[in-house]
Amino acid sequence: MTRLFITLGVVFIIVGLAWPWLGKLGLGRLPGDIVIEREGFRFYFPITTMVVVSLVVSAIFWLFRK
């Protein structure tokens, strides 16, 4: 359990440091992401981005299990 928390912490640190470069990949602005903007209101639901991230994370976990 301790090893899992240390690994998750390191992953969060790496993602936090790489965030400026990850923003340039276009995640969050993919076709299929729902954005509703009105005066004084903004609703954002990144469906496509969540699916892509889920597939990548699932593939990484699958590779580490093998």
Image (cartoon, helix red, strand yellow):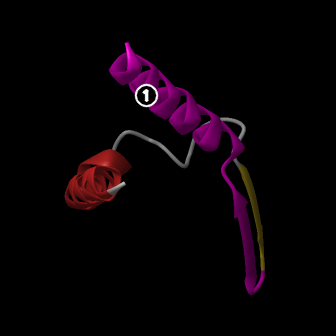
In front here: 36 or 66?
66
Toward which corner of the image does residue 45 lie, by quadrant? bottom right
Q: Read off the residue under disc 1.
A: 61
Give SS at disc 1: helix
The verdict on residue 6 being magenta is no
Query: Which residue corresponds to the image point at 44% horizontal and 41% vertical from the top-left?
Result: 26
Query: Which residue corresponds to the image point at 21% horizontal and 53% vertical from the top-left?
Result: 14
Query: Which residue corresponds to the image point at 37% horizontal and 39% vertical from the top-left?
Result: 25
Quadrant location, the N terminus: bottom left
Q: Classify 20 as above or below 50.
A: below
Q: Classify 58 as above or below 26.
A: above
Q: Is residue 20 left or right of residue 34?
A: left
The image shows residue 37 at horizontal and vertical percentages of 75, 69
Q: Which residues are magenta?
A: 39-66
Toward which corner of the image does residue 20 lie, by quadrant? bottom left
The image shows residue 49 at horizontal and vertical percentages of 59, 41
Q: Classify 26 as above or below 17.
A: above
Q: Main secondary structure of the magenta part?
A: helix
